Image (spheres, grey):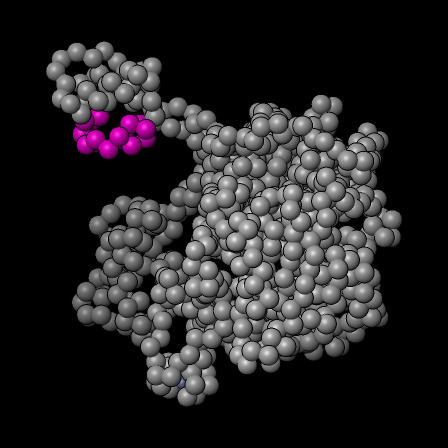
Amino acid sequence: MFEFCDVALPVPLDIVFTYAVPDGMQPVVGGRVLVPFRQQRMSGVVTELHERKPEVRTKNLIRVLDPEPVLDQPLLRLGKWIADYYLAPVGEVFRTMLPLGAEFKRAISYRITEEGQLALHLAGMSGSSARSQKTPEDQLAEFRALDYLAERDTTREESLRSATRVSKALLGGMVRKKWIAREDLSEAQNAARTVKVALLKNVDGKLNANQRTLTDTLAAAGGKLPVDTLQSLELPRTSLATLVKRGMVEISEEAAEFTMSQLKARPNLFDFQFNSAQQAALKSIREQVGATKFAGMLLHGITGSGKTAIYLAAMRSVLEAGRSAILLVPEIGLTPAVAADLHQLFGEEVAILHSALSDKERAEQWHRIKRGDARIVVGTRSAVFAPVSDLALVIVDEEQDPSYKQEEMPRYHARDVAVMRAKMADAVVVLGSATPSLESYFNAKKHKYTLLELPDRVEKRPLPEVEIIDMRQEFQETGSEQVISRKLAEEIKERLEKKEQVMVLLNRRGYSPVVLCRACGKTLECKNCAIAMTHHKRSRRMECHYCGYTAPVPKACIHCGSEYVYFLGTGSEKLEELLHGMFPQARIGRLDRDTVRGREDFERALNALDEGELDLLVGTQMIAKGHDIHGVTLVGVVGADMALGFPDFRAAERTFQLLTQVAGRAGRGQTPGKVVLQTYFPGHYAVQYAAQHDFTGFYEKELRFRSWMHYPPYSALANVLVRSNKMDEALRWSGILGKWFEQTRHEGIRVLGPAAAPIVRLKQDYRHHFVVKSASREKLNALLRAMLAFAAQQKIPRTQLIVDVDAVWLM
Ligand SMILES: [Zn+2]
Ligand SMILES: [Zn+2]
């Protein structure tokens, strides 16, 4: 028996914590335990059992939550690698890897102490007394809470807060003053989802019409139905209650079944007609999988070349061999239709993980995978941690997609974690894309990955012709700023007359992106961010696209009161309106985050297009993502090159990828497609190469630029961001770190900064940053680790210092 165990807790500290193991408890490495931590209970993962007595006094474990590991050795190793590589606290990494939050119930209570009683008594005697630093509202809230607690025993935090509207911060302060005592009784709970079902018993006696409807409905369904279904009949609730009271209906709880998808799958999914390039790619993936050692492969297939069919066939052979596979897809890619297809293909052997699942559903899927019931896992970013055993194949579809990068702690990149996971499991990783990231393409060129190419579209459909429209010239010739060029308008008209379909991309949602005052020249900025607010006409409000803050539409300038406020620029909402005006007969739909709330909306809009219920679809980058809609013969690009003006070294790469993807939407059916690409940067190589469908040309040019500038893939890069809601604090901290970087100059490391971040204020935080680059990742990480240690000494809170290794977003 071991006396001590080290536990990784989900707190922003780069250490593990040692606890004593009481007699009779048997924690396991990789299993969860419940522990006391700073007046709280937390669940953490055991990383080691040992006999080394720590110098400080240890607390006891409260409970062992898992008799068996929830993270097996390979996943523990992977988690430690992530913590090390991304400089993230290992406890935060493990929490991200385990979607089991639903199995832990927070239960915090408070009770009043003698000191609290006294304070309340004194306050009663002297009116609203003492404590002058606090605002009167805060004081009142404190005494409301004391009053409330004085009349009760221990009270749950939720009840206390909803009854007295006291903030968490105030409660913390009251605990420190010893007015109240905090008790944490958080516990593991059974997270199984249940449904209430109604069972029909003996019906006798007189029933009214509503009661009769209920018993008839139940009888027709074989005597048993979910209560929800009965309630959807919209009868008075008392009808069912009366039947229960009279013993004619019984209500019980049953385990809920998981519905993968409500939709019908498309027929003939496995009737793949593979062309020779597809056959060759599939053969080579199968061979590598058979070799049971690590191999990385980059499947570079142009848009419409049939990559998905290869993934599915490869996964099927893995399943037939009795092994496991994981397929990662971008955030928006996992629509209900895709889920239905997968369910049809793999039956109960597939588990689907995505962000629309509830915590309980996620936990349920996780357990199905862990038990080995599902050996094919399809999911977004965090599915890379699925607890499959005997992993043979990991596929990352659209590997360049930014949704694979987690932009919160731990800031990992799921594609890179997928590669490492495959490496640790002697499995094969396949990265698929029409527009691979520079990093992956570079690795393939260096023979770290095998390059598999699909150079042709299925059935030899030609790639669309791309015509570039120089919008500066359009301005000169028409004498005014145009949203839709004469050429694009003419082409749209022609297609609509021929009953063909059109897509128009404008990668900016809302109506107008800028509100400008002509009197004082100022714009309307978000109160939390240094970002102009966007006008949304239909919802009649201003919205910040970075933090979600909304405000009423201004009638006058908020700075000077002038009424000369102008709404400038065009977003997708305004584009839709413009097109309605130009083509009043056309049926027009729009696809952006304002019209799409969930995956169902997304799919509905695409289905409407596919079934010919729409003539024209307007949208943001959402419309560019891999859908196969055969009727679209024209794609207009109205705004996709805005990013080229951003101070971000990946701007050209992103623009190239977006243009290539949206161009790929044209001509996927029998009629050849055309793309009209409007741009203010007609000479830019990202635009030129995208127009020529010349991937290699773009990569070679871009790689030269990266090499000159010492950017990835030629060096490892980290963005170090210092943030605070106080302007002087952010500045002071970045100054302290700036000096430290200067004094600890290291061979082979470049530090740029401190500088104000391109978005200097975001979500109320002022932001300064450093960009740190080195050809040696070891050197880079060693320096960053030393910097974190120094920052801790200087009392810069870890939460205010973001280290983003392999950052994809430098704004
Ligand atoms: Zn003004
Ligand atoms: Zn904002």
Can see residue 691? yes
Q: Residue at x 33, y 14 (%)?
A: 222
Q: Quadrant of residue 224?
A: top left
Q: Residue at x 80, y 39 (%)?
A: 277
Q: Is residue 231 magenta?
A: yes
Question: Which quadrant of the figure contains the N terminus?
Answer: top right
Farthest residue to the bottom: give it: 519
The residue nearer to you, when weighing 681 against 233, is 681
Q: Which residues are magenta?
A: 227-243
Farthest residue to the right: give it: 447
Residue 751 falls left or right of residue 125: right
The residue nearer to you, when weighing 476 against 33, is 476
Q: Main secondary structure of the magenta part?
A: helix
Residue 254 falls left or right of residue 472: left
Q: Position of residue 136 (x, y in %)?
A: 27, 71
Q: Position of residue 612 (x, y in %)?
A: 50, 44
- Asked if residue 249 is positioned above or below residue 547 in the image, the reply reads above
Q: Position of residue 498 (x, y in %)?
A: 55, 51
- Asked if residue 37 is positioned above or below residue 125 in the image, the reply reads above
Q: Residue at x 56, y 54 (%)?
A: 495
Q: Position of residue 455 (x, y in %)?
A: 78, 46
Q: Is residue 123 magenta?
A: no
Q: Residue at x 59, y 32 (%)?
A: 342
Instruction: Point out the quarter of the image occupied by ligand 1.
Output: bottom left
The residue nearer to you, when weighing 211 against 32, is 211
Question: Which quadrant of the figure contains the C terminus?
Answer: bottom right
Can see residue 173? no
The residue nearer to you, when weighing 247 against 39, is 247
Q: Quadrant of residue 439?
A: bottom right
